[in-house]
Amino acid sequence: MPHTDFDVVTLSPSTVRVMHRVAHHIYEFALVDDGYGRRVVSRGPQITFGRGEISALELLSAAEQVAAATARHTGMID
């Protein structure tokens, strides 16, 4: 699933929220300390289910990749 299928709808020092453009599922990932002093995107986001025929769980991995890439690109995580 290409990153262009998602929009970043929230980016803050504590949260990255991404939305799938077609299915409108919203995935909210917390930015947390991993216990080794690094900031990372948490696993297991809060999901707000949208509509459409695409399952939210099918998109979970891609959503996590988009959130991590965005947070890394903006310097929010290591």
Image (cartoon, rainbow, N blue to C red):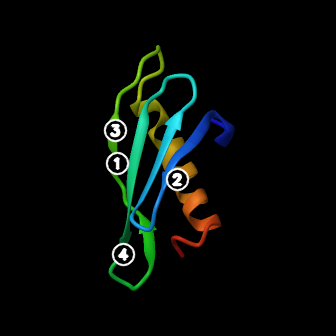
Q: Quote the CA–CA distance across marks 2 and 1.
A: 10 Å
3D distance between C-alphas at marks 4 and 2: 16 Å
Q: Which residue is mark 4?
A: 34
Q: Amino acid at mark 3?
A: Ile
Q: Is residue 25 above or below residue 34?
A: above
Residue 20 is left or right of residue 43, and the answer is right
Q: CA distance from mark 3 to mark 2?
A: 13 Å
Question: Which residue carries the number 1 mark?
Answer: 45
Label 1 is placed on what type of residue? Pro
In what quadrant of the picture does the C terminus appear?
bottom right
Mark 3 or mark 4: name the one nearer the start of the chain: 4
> Dot 1, crowdedness within 10 Å: few (<14), some or many (≥20)?
some
Q: Is residue 15 left or right of residue 62?
A: left
**Marker disc for residue 60:** none
On the image, the x and y values in percent for residue 63 come to 51, 43
Q: Which residue is mark 3?
A: 47
Q: Earlier in the sequence, mark 3 or mark 2?
A: 3
Disc 4 secondary structure class: loop
Q: Are marks 3 and 1 in contact (CB under 8 Å)?
A: yes
Between discs 4 and 2, the one toward the N terminus: 4
Label 3 and label 1: CA atoms lie apart by 6 Å
Image point (57%, 49%), residue name: 66
Instruction: List x then y, in percent, for residue 16.
Output: 46, 55
Q: Secondary structure at mark 2?
A: helix
Whether pointer 1 and pointer 4 mark residues with C-beta atoms closer than 8 Å, the reply is: no
Q: Earlier in the sequence, mark 2 or mark 1?
A: 1
Vertical position of residue 13 compared to residue 16: above or below: below
Q: Which residue is mark 2?
A: 67
Amino acid type, callout 4: Asp
Q: Is residue 5 above or below residue 77?
A: above
Which residue type does callout 2 highlight? Ala
Rendering quarter of residue 38: bottom left
